[in-house]
Structure formats: structure tokens, C-alpha cells
Amino acid sequence: MNRYKLLTGLFVLDVMLFALAGVPAFKHAHHGIKWIVGGVGWFGGLACTLILIALALATLVQHARTRRTRTIWLTRRSRP
């Protein structure tokens, strides 16, 4: 799967989970199913944010390594 599509999907899921956690009925609940749904939204959003940051950093590192390897390969190839 393309990493950029995965990052976009995680971002959309993250926004949806935080929006779910911000609904006043779930946000101010102290017990019951509303409290559980609010907690799943909040902690799911936090976990999704953590995964999103880690995947974004991994994508940046991979891109930098690929670019560096390509530059080194082109430099070595141009030498007589």
C-alpha cells in the first residue's frame, strides 16, 4: 500500500475519533455506554496520532535515505 494513502487514511480516522470524543454527550458522560464511546474516541485518537507521527517520521527517513543513495550512485557513476 502506498504510504501517503495510509497517512491520509490515518489522518481522517484520527480527526473522526477526536470529533467523536468531542461530542458533548460523550465528553461529559461519567458512566455507561456514552462514557465508553467517549473513551474509545479519545484514546483511539491518541493512539492514532502516535502511529501517524511514527509513520510520518519513518516515511521521511526512508525518503532521505533513498535520495542520498541515489545522489551517491549518480556521483560515482559520473566519475571516469
Image (spheres, helix red, strand yellow):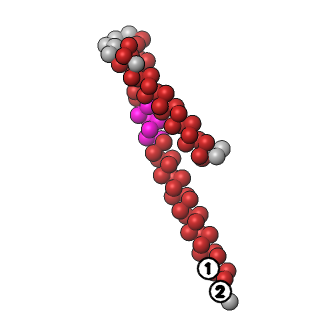
Residue labelled with disc 1: 75
What SS does tag 2 mark?
Answer: loop
Give the CA separation, mark 1 to mark 2. 7 Å
Residue labelled with disc 2: 79
Q: Residue furthest bottom?
A: 80
Q: Residue furthest top?
A: 32
Across and down, in percent, residue 25 comes to 38, 13
What SS does tag 1 mark?
Answer: helix
Front residue of 18 and 57: 18
Q: Dot 1 surroundings within 10 Å: few (below 14), some, or many (20 or more)?
A: few
Across and down, in percent, residue 6 comes to 59, 41
Across and down, in percent, residue 1 comes to 66, 44
Front residue of 24 and 80: 24
User: Magenta includes 46?
Assistant: yes
Q: Are marks 1 and 2 in contact (CB under 8 Å)?
A: yes
The structure residue drawn at horizontal position 43% and vertical position 18%, both measured from the top left corner, is 37
Q: Which residues are magenta?
A: 45-51
